[in-house]
Amino acid sequence: MKVAFYTLGCKVNQNETGALAQLFYENGFEPAPDGGEADVYIVNSCTVTAGGDKKSRQWLRRAKRRNPGAVTVLTGCFPQAFPGEALAVEEADIITGSGARRRVLDNVLRFLQEGGRIVDIAPHEKSERFEELPMERLEGHTRAFMKIEDGCNRRCAYCVIPRARGSVRSRAEESILGELAALAKGGYAEVVFSGINLSSYGRDTGTDLAEIVEKAAQVPGIRRIRLGSLEPDLMTEEMIARMARVPALCPQFHLSLQSGCDATLRRMRRIYDTAGYRAVVEKLRAAFPGASFTTDVIVGFPGETETDFEESAAFVREIGFLKVHVFSFSRRAGTPAYDMPDQIDEAEKARRSHRLQAEADAVRARVIAGMEGCPVEVLLEKPVNNTLFTGYTREYVPVLLKAPGHRQGGIVHAVLGAFDGTRCTAALAE
């Protein structure tokens, strides 16, 4: 039987879809061809925005139209956070939450034998532990993505993720290091650590993110370690100093911002202000010369005035982010922001989103242009032909370069050239 997956949202969701796929393939299922018909359709949902919920419903409806006899599964954060709304998706034969991922396969096999709609949404519990899933190994991938943390203990005013994901749960150190050894043996030179609140790794087990980075770097064959989204207030001086002593750690930091306006940050119930954020950036730049920064910014949060928006945009320009993901505030039922006064209309949110993204793209072009002529280390990712590859530097600059005699997954030394708006040209270092 053929199975198709559709993933929405963050890197954690993508990791979990990879693990689900491996579970299904190991149990006799085959991947459906791109755009082809499948016997089982699985959507791994995201519920950060209402738009994500809508996309999940639309995909399932298309799947049922394509093959009315197929088994359709709605899983992930949407059903976990909003079970009532998920149950109303009539096209879903099986509905599960963000936990007990292994039961997705069991539920599909049960449905194939018995029929009848299955709803399996287990509530998160404080005693819950990190769920081990098979490692993700996808053909054509040169970086390994590894989920090492789940859940979040924070209560930001706009966010439904703690309800969808539960409390912080950290993956066991021996499990991480064992998988890293297997990945290195399989030819992966770079690993990307991800989590719902990655900076909180180890807070439930008595360790911390710096320690697992230090130990991961000692695994033979792992040459580059990259970190997912980080909370700036949790990047302490000690953590930064320890990480700076790990040569394998890539100097690219995705520091969650959400707004560059202090008044908006207070309404969002974030735990830092722009001065604190700026201080963390300065400490990281001092510890990692040439470091790059990426982030997320919400526009149109309730009460955000035009002056607030301008302040946020100015902060984005000041920091000089390599890349910014801009998105409009989405009201999520059950969060404090849902009922806040001075909601911004959708047209104004769209205007601000487009404007800030244009400014962020201009900052990106300026930052990358400033790197022209710099020596870099490039992981060769996708071959365009026998000698031409796309790839990424340690700072996460996308490049295009000729590397005759080298293979996909290799790491080469190069010199950056001009930026064309999409990628930098690069040449092998002599």
Image (tube, grey):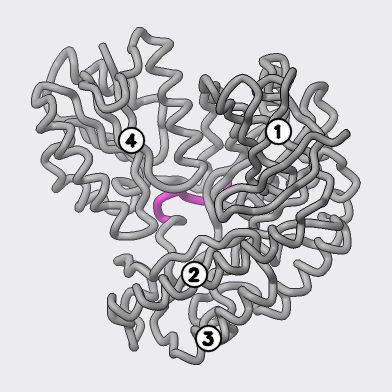
Task: Name the mark on residue 310.
Answer: 3
- The reply to whether dot 2 and dot 4 touch (C-beta < 8 Å) is no
Q: Residue at x 26, y 11 (%)?
A: 1
Of labels 2 and 4, earlier in sequence is: 4
Query: Residue 362, percent across and down?
Result: 58, 68
The kind of residue on which mark 3 rests is Glu
Q: Residue at x 22, y 47 (%)?
A: 86
Residue under circle 2? Answer: 358
Give left or right: position of 195 versus 205.
Answer: left
Given the current orientation, which residue lies at the most extreme top position? Answer: 28
Query: As displayed, is residue 229 above or below residue 386?
Result: below
Q: Is residue 407 magenta?
A: no
The reply to whether residue 387 is in sight is yes
Estimate the spatial distance between the alpha carbons at disc 1 and disc 4, rounded to whole Å: 27 Å
Which residues fall within the magenta stretch?
163-168
Task: Name the mark on residue 78.
Answer: none
Residue under circle 1? Answer: 379
Where disc 2 sits, the SS reads helix
Callout in the foreground (1, 4):
1
- Viewer-closest of 158 and 170: 158
Of labels 3 and 2, earlier in sequence is: 3
Of labels 4 and 3, earlier in sequence is: 4
Give left or right: position of 279 versus 315.
Answer: right
The kind of residue on which mark 1 rests is Leu
Q: Residues within 10 Å of mark 1 (few under 14, many from 20)?
A: many
Q: Quadrant of the C terminus?
A: top right
Estimate the spatial distance between the alpha carbons at disc 1 and disc 3, rounded to whole Å: 37 Å
Query: Residue 404, percent across and down?
Result: 72, 22
The kind of residue on which mark 2 rests is Ala
